[in-house]
Amino acid sequence: MTHHLEALTRMNEKRSDLRNLRKEGRLPCNLLGKKGTIGMVHVNAREFSLLMRDGLTKTLELSIDGGTSVSVELKEIQRNPVTKDIIHVDMLIAGGTAAAGA
């Protein structure tokens, strides 16, 4: 079964902007390809947590800005060491060559 998530592109890299995204219930993610970071997106943190709780293995479909759908694999999930909340996710684009919103 393939899991689907809606993602929106983000242009900001500052720590304060990422903190504000998290306060709004969004989870910052990097899309990685063979040559490094291809794009930066954010997804709904609650939906992602529910997928993790329900047994998300490694693969999911991201619909970026309501248009392009990209198959990604989870590469790394960063958690807050105290609260264990997910604070950042790195996703590897399946095939590694797709241009995902960038």
Image (spheres, rainbow, N blue to C red):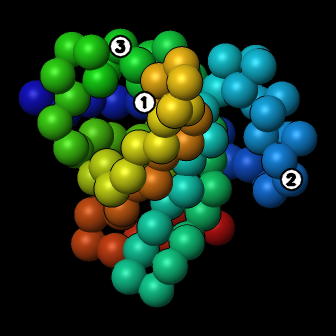
Disc 1 and disc 2: Cα gap in Å?
Answer: 24 Å
Disc 3 and disc 1: Cα gap in Å?
Answer: 11 Å
Disc 2 and disc 3: Cα gap in Å?
Answer: 27 Å
Above-or-below relation of 21 to 31: above
Q: Position of residue 37 (x, y in %)?
A: 55, 72
User: Can you tell which quarter of the image residue 22 is in?
Assistant: top right
Residue that badge 3 annotates: 50
Above-or-below relation of 67 to 72: above
Residue that badge 1 annotates: 5
Q: Position of residue 61 (x, y in %)?
A: 33, 41
Q: In the visual, does 96 lie left or right of 13?
A: left
Judge depth for marks 1 and 2 and give the one in front.
2
Q: Position of residue 59 (x, y in %)?
A: 22, 44
Q: Amino acid at mark 1?
A: Leu
Residue that badge 2 annotates: 14
Q: Dot 2 lies on which element? A: loop
Residue at x 41%, y 19% (from the top left corner): 49
Where the C terminus falls, by quadrant? bottom right
Above-or-below relation of 18 to 76: above
Mark 1, other Cα within 10 Å: few <14 / some 14–19 / many ≥20: some
